[in-house]
């Protein structure tokens, strides 16, 4: 009887703790969206996970990660969670979009991810492969929808596993849809090594930077999967030969002790770690077109004058007292500035000791603009380092 009472007490304490946590911590759940598409005769189910402080940080734009096979929610959930635990800087939180594939007898992920060539369809028992339709849906319908409904940067990462990874290779080689790719355990053998041959003969654009992470597990040890091994090794040899242009950073890693499915979290962790290092190493690179941006700072002291300083000449090249915002009225300071992307900057009152901390953007790091189409950014500052 005492044991039962003790168990009940523990259960009640745990329930109270969970309720208290719900009161204290704000959790942003994934939104479910069903998008109509001219490329399919059914709505496409999409998950959208926003950063926890998305509504409050309304001057902040976010990178977007697209996760395929999101009908297996563990893929989507791990892709949302890992960056928060692995990195505390700019890339720790972004918008994560999960693309679900139907799972029924008439249409499932194989139809979604495989091309419509006769060898592949015959091998998989398909009437038709719809990967080209799915690529058009992602590029022409889904990505514009995400950019028009959420505050995004111009940077996109795609994550796919198995046939989902095979689909990402098609996205890269056929339409150059995403900037960066995690390609986990792809099948490159179907269609008489179709994807492997295509990758090794692809002419990459020498102006666009791409990060590619390939992984494999113990697939070739499984009966019926032995054919995966040869094209994968050919692709790895090609990557290691150094023939890819310098703007393409390509890694690969094997997990021979892990099964096909179980290797996903291991590869995801390693890929994110290396990807964050890659992004930080390239974060200072600016170039390309020049964009005019209108920047406003709202202050709560009519005496305050505000300066902007950043990573290029139009922003003062980090000289804290070179570029001053116009005094519009007692609460608004503004400037129209021509920048290349990504623009990184801070606000001060003329010295590093007086740096301002916007209440509506991620604090403690450089502010950023990396969106070509967004013209106006408004920051609210009431806290300064010296006050």
Image (cartoon, rainbow, N blue to C red):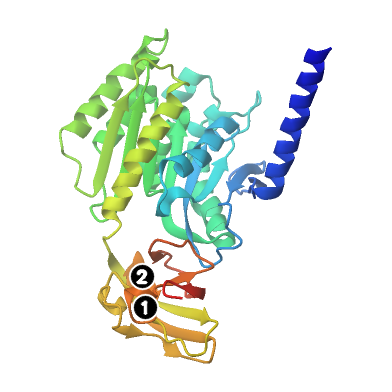
The N terminus, quarter of image = top right
| Residue 232 placement, left or right of 182 | left
Q: Residues within 10 Å of mark 2 (few under 14, many from 20)?
A: some
At a point 55% along the width and 55% down the height, the residue shown is 146
Of the numbered discs in the image, which one, if any, rests on residue 345?
A: 2
The residue to which callout 1 is attached is: 308
Of the numbered discs in the image, which one, if any, rests on residue 71?
A: none
103 vs 264, nearest the viewer? 264
Which quadrant holds residue 155? bottom left
Position of residue 137 measured from the top left corner of the image (x, y, whole percent): 54, 47
From where the camera sits, is residue 341 visible? yes
Position of residue 44 measured from the top left corner of the image (x, y, whole percent): 63, 42
Q: Residue furthest top?
A: 223
Position of residue 342 measured from the top left corner of the image (x, y, whole percent): 35, 64
From where the camera sits, is residue 115 visible? no
At a point 38% along the width and 25% down the height, the residue shown is 191
Mark 1 lies on a secondary structure that is strand
Real-space Cα separation, disc 1 to disc 2, in angstroms:
7 Å
Position of residue 156 measured from the top left corner of the image (x, y, whole percent): 43, 50
Q: Is residue 80 above or below residue 329?
A: above
| Mark 1 vs 2: CB contact within 8 A | yes
Q: Residues within 10 Å of mark 1 (few under 14, many from 20)?
A: many
351 vs 332, nearest the viewer? 351
Q: Choose the circle earlier in sequence order: 1 or 2.
A: 1
Which quadrant holds residue 207? bottom left
Mark 2 lies on a secondary structure that is strand
């Amino acid at each position: 009887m005492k044991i039962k009472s003790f168990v009940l007490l523990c259960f009640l304490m745990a329930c109270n703790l969970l309720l208290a946590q719900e009161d204290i911590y704000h959790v942003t759940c994934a939104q479910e969206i069903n998008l109509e598409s001219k490329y399919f005769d059914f709505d496409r189910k999409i998950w959208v996970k926003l950063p926890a402080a998305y509504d409050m940080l309304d001057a902040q734009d976010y990178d977007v990660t697209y996760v395929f096979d999101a009908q297996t929610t563990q893929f989507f959930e791990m892709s949302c969670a890992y960056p928060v635990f692995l990195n505390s800087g700019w890339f720790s939180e972004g918008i994560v979009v999960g693309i679900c594939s139907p799972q029924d007898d008439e249409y499932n992920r194989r139809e979604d991810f495989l091309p419509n060539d006769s060898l592949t369809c015959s091998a998989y028992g398909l009437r038709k492969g719809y990967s080209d339709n799915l690529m058009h849906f992602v590029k022409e319908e889904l990505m514009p929808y995400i950019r028009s409904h959420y505050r995004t940067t111009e940077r996109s990462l795609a994550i796919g596993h198995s046939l989902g990874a095979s689909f990402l290779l098609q996205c890269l080689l056929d339409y150059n849809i995403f900037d960066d790719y995690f390609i986990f355990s792809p099948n490159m053998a179907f269609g008489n090594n179709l994807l492997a041959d295509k990758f090794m003969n692809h002419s990459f654009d020498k102006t666009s930077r791409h990060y590619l992470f390939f992984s494999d597990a113990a697939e070739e040890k499984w009966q019926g999967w032995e054919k995966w091994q040869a094209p994968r090794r050919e692709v790895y040899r090609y990557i290691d030969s150094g023939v890819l242009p310098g703007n393409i950073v390509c890694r690969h890693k094997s997990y021979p002790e892990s099964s096909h499915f179980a290797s996903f979290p291991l590869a995801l962790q390693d890929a994110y770690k290396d990807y964050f290092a890659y992004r930080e190493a390239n974060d200072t690179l600016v170039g390309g077109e020049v964009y005019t941006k209108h920047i406003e700072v709202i202050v709560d002291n009519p005496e305050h004058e505000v300066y902007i300083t950043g990573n290029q000449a139009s922003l003062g090249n980090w000289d804290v007292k070179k570029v001053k915002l116009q005094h519009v009225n007692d609460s608004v300071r503004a400037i129209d500035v021509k920048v290349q992307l990504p623009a990184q900057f801070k606000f001060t009152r003329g010295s590093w000791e007086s740096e301002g901390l916007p209440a509506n953007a991620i604090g403690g790091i450089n502010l950023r603009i990396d969106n070509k189409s967004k013209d106006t950014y408004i920051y609210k500052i009431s806290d300064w380092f010296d006050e």
